[in-house]
Structure formats: C-alpha cells, structure tokens
Amino acid sequence: MAGVDLTGANVVITGGHSGLGLVTTRALSAAGASVTVAARDPKRAARAVLGIRRVEVERLDLLDPASIDAFTARYRRSGRPLHILVNNAGLPSAGGLQHDARGYESQLAVNHLGHFQLTLGLQPVLRAAGGARVVTTSSGAHRMSDILWDDPHFRTGRHHPDLAYSQSKTANVLFTVELDRRWSDGGIRAFAPHPGIVPATAFNGSAGDEARRAMGLIDDLGNPIIDPTRGVKTLEQGAATIVLAAASPLLAGIGGVYLNNGDVSPVDASTGPVDMTSPPADVAPHAIDPGSAHRLWELSEQLVGTPTLETYSLVV
C-alpha cells in the first residue's frame, strides 16, 4: 500500500470486522478509503472496528436473500459510487450438511451465491465509480473439487464439509473469470485472491487442534507456526494479497485472475495426493475454464433469480 492514496474511494467489505477482513479494513482505511463493513451482527462488528477512521457498519446476512436485497437497495439510495467491493465473508469447512431455507447447501449459498446476488445488486454503483474492482476471497482448497454440476447441494448423500468448501472456493474463481468477461468493458475488473493458510482465522481453527498439528499449523502448545515458504501466514501476510487485489496499481489493466502470494498465479495442472503440510495453492485449470465460468453464472442466475431491468438498469 506504500504510495497508494484511496482518498474519496468507497469500499464495501463483507466480514470486514474479523480476521483477514478486519486487517483489510484497517489497511484500506489507512490509505484514505471510506469503508462499509457488511456484517450479520452489526453490534459485534461495530465493537471490532471501533477507532478505525471512516468506517461504518451495515447489516448483511448472506444466507438471507431479503437481507442482501435490503443492503444493496440502501447502498444504491445513498447515491455513492462503489470503487471496491471485497467479497470476503464465508463459512468454513466444518460441521455436517446444512441447507438454507431454499434448500441450497450452506457453504455454496454463503461463499458464492450470497456474494453473487450482492455483486449483481451493486453493479450500478460499481459502474458509476468509473473504474472499480470486485475482489472475492478464494482459497487453495479450490484445487480439491470442481463444481459438482450434477448435485451441487449434496442431495444424494455424498456430502463432506471439505468437499463442499472446496466447491464453493472454485465457484469464487469461476465467478471472477466470468464477471470480468462480462463487466470489464464497463470499467469493473475482478480478482480472486488466495490469502494462504492463516492459523489465526476461524477457517483454519475449525479444523481442530489435532488436525492443525498434523498440518504443521500449530505446535504442541497450540501456538501458531508461521512459515510463508509453505503458505502458512500471519493475518497481515494473508491479507496482503487481498489488499493487492483491492488497490494495487500493479494490477491496472488486468482482471479475471486468481492471485497467490501477491502475484497473478501460474496454472498448476498437477494431480495426485496432496501433502497437507505444504499443500499446492496455485490455480487449477478447472477453476479458470471459461466454459465452466459461463455455465456457473447461468446456474447462479437461476438459483438466486435475475434482477429486473426496471430495478437494475445497468446489469448486463
């Protein structure tokens, strides 16, 4: 962020009050941006961001379509353009199979479909910025699963939380690819950063101490083991790639890409057993396939419904 001036820029960050989201909020605010933190629990979020300049908190529940519509309607009525949207909040890979009120698998519903609906609702204000970025936090876990096209909501009984999480993270990258293709002519570019493995986040904490020790994330006393050479990072190191996607001039003229370790990721088509002590994290071919990206967009429109022309005159 050295030399980056975001004075006058408006930012929305989902989950911008905890973990990587909070570090990102602080970094963008420090550069001069005005940040709206979108959170399911506004009171908790307000306590977390207390003292950070130019930050406001708004309620948003990504599992509730009505809450998403209410948030986007409020923002549009404010008359403010939106320069940076960071789709950061999500559900970790833990627990049994859960569906939302529509019958959609909960990790796909929150991590992808909720952000898909949010982004479509904010497209007019993104375009009004005259140059905007949509940043959707992904994960190296995308490598473990393509979209389960025949049963994305696990209605056939083959559910596993890690598989569901991996599918949702692939969806984040495919969404980024197709969004950039559709909207880049209107000045909206899209990025999918992988923050790395961050022991301090709830996502990695949900694995349990035994699993985290096996992965080399914590020592015998439960202290985090930070080793960026194998992708295990502090919160600040993990958030660096998210902030790069949101604000770095190094990405001017680029879009529709997956970022890893502060750069555009090479494609890694390797297959086989994954060593969880040093898992591969570069982008897999299935996550950037343009045909799959188009197919997922159309499926997502079917699942969340498409906006009417009267409501969102700028949606393409």
Image (spheres, rainbow, N blue to C red):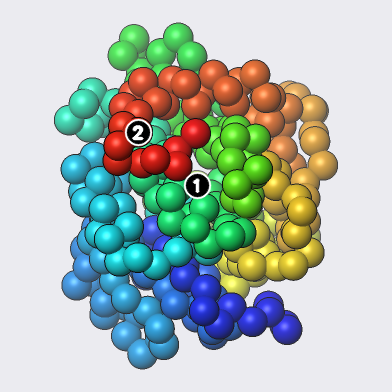
Residue under pointer 1: 211
Instruction: Pick whichever, 74 or 160, lies toward us.
Output: 74
Vertical order, 313 against 251 (above or below): above
Nearest to the eye among marks 1 and 2: give it. Answer: 2
Query: Which disc is residue 309 wearing?
Result: 2
- Residue 296 shows in this picture: yes
Nearest to N terminus: mark 1 or mark 2: 1
Quarter of the N terminus within the rendering: bottom right
Cα distance in 3D space between marks 1 and 2: 49 Å
Total label count?
A: 2
Amino acid at dot 1: Ala
Q: Residue at x 56, y 46 (%)?
A: 138
Compared across the picture, whether 70 is left or right of 52 comes to left
Q: Specify few, some or many for label 2: CA neighbours under 10 Å numbering under 14, 14-19, or 20 or more.
A: few
Compared across the picture, whether 282 is left or right of 113 comes to right
Query: Which disc is residue 274 wearing?
Result: none
Q: Residue at x 78, y 64 (%)?
A: 250
Q: Specify few, some or many for label 1: CA neighbours under 10 Å numbering under 14, 14-19, or 20 or more.
A: some
Residue 235 at x, y = what percent?
Answer: 55, 69
Q: Residue at x 80, y 34 (%)?
A: 268
Residue 130 at x, y = what percent?
Answer: 58, 60
Amino acid at dot 2: Leu
Instruction: Pick whichever, 133 or 284, lies toward us.
Output: 133
